[in-house]
Amino acid sequence: MADDGTHVIVGAGLAGAKAAETLREGGAGRIVLIGDEQERPYDRPPLSKEYLQGNAGRDAVYLHPADWYAEHGIELRTGVRASAVDRDAHEVVLADGERVGYRTLLLTTGSSPRRLPVPGTDLDGVHLLRTLGDSDTIAAAIRSSSRMVVIGGGWIGLEVTAAARIAGVAVTLIESAPLPLLRVLGPEIAEVFAALHREHGVDLRVDTDLAGIRGQDGRVTGVRLADGTEIDADAVVVGVGITPNTDLAEAAGLEVSDGVVVDARHRTSDPDVHAAGDVANLWYPAFERHLRVEHWDNALNGGPAAARAMLGDDTEYDHLPYFFTDQYDLGMEYTGYVAPGEYDEVVVRGDLSSREFVAFWLAGGRVLAGMNVNIWDVTDPIARLVRLEETFDRARHADPAVPLA
């Protein structure tokens, strides 16, 4: 039976937990937060950064203390899988058959790591990184390994590689493209990250395809490349992207296209169902297009925005995409969005070789995105440029001697 006062959130990650917090602050009635992991909601960026490196304790990754949910009247259901959404009845069906009625429903079901279509991925010692338990397992592998292979030169692959090298593990990084992060950053800036890892002793194999993962007695012993080369390894970490968890939405008949399609208010094709975080393909008015943003900041801000919409706020979400990384002594922030091949030029303010610069991606003179590397407190002026609140002045913005702010 439909519930006239219950807000249900399926997915107890950052987006879901922050949505629940916002609903409570907004005076919502009953709030049910359902998560299939046994853990209470936690932050994911530390899993490939400071937590993986042992520089942050387990308590630091949780979003709230264990008793916070009960104290704030939020029914946190961990270790519970939602198996279906009955939109006609306004009910979420749980795996054990229980039905939870809702007035509004928020899907924050997140994403899952892509798996490699090669032999050997089921061997012991082959790891994916998505959950807190995955990070614990990879951290243990780093401590016990002398040789590691990382497959995939995206953000997760590079951050795990940095953690392993800092711990003294020999790492071979395999990337099918000519450079790591090439699709995201283009050749000018991707080369900065390639050089960074080479300088820290990473055996970087680019333009390289994987044929399979080798093992003995059920345990990984290395990898085999497409050209027949074999590389020994005590552990293998696979980081080749993620796929949005849309099964629940698809089965419910919601519009799905590279994620759950939502408008600028996080509303799906059903006005009583919203979606946020990794799973949401959101309309961005600033770019006049749908984007599915797979970064922490999107969950941090998108969850609360969806919750406000569930409470009747009709404001469009206008937060620009943002992400960050920390690798060795390099810290970076990126604001905006540029699709592969959709920019004319990259303007660099500073010195790429010293890894202290700001880069701007431009198309037709317009700034689409900006990235600051080892330079801080400039995200606001970068965002103003992306929003066209300030005209890009090449002489001024490309000159490190002139304040950017």
Image (cartoon, rainbow, N blue to C red):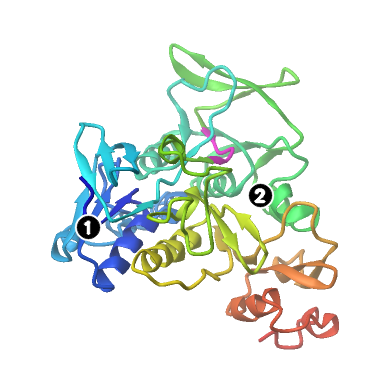
Q: Between residue 303 and residue 229, name the one nearer to us.
A: 303
Q: Is residue 354 above or below residue 86?
A: below
Tell which tag, 1 or 2, sits nearer the viewer. Answer: 1
Is mark 1 in CB contact (under 8 Å) with mark 2?
no
Number of callouts: 2
**Looking at the rendering, which quadrant does residue 193 occupy?**
bottom right
Q: Earlier in the sequence, mark 1 or mark 2?
A: 1
Residue 46 rendering spot, x and y as whole percentages: 42, 55
Neighbour class for label 2 at 10 Å: few (<14), some, many (≥20)? many
Going 34% across and 63% down the picture, which residue do you hit? 18
Give, as a single range, the part of the protein colored magenta.
237-242
State the CA–CA distance, disc 1 to disc 2.
55 Å
Q: Which residue is mark 1?
A: 4
Q: Quadrant of the C terminus?
A: bottom right
Residue 168 rendering spot, x and y as whole percentages: 52, 44
Q: Which residue is mark 2?
A: 197
- Verify whether residue 60 appears in magenta: no
Q: Quadrant of the N terminus?
A: top left
Residue 10 rendering spot, x and y as whole percentages: 33, 48
Q: Is residue 369 visible?
A: yes
Going 59% across and 37% down the picture, which residue do you hit? 240
Q: Going by the image, does 97 lie left or right of 85? A: left
Going 48% across and 48% down the picture, which residue do you hit? 279
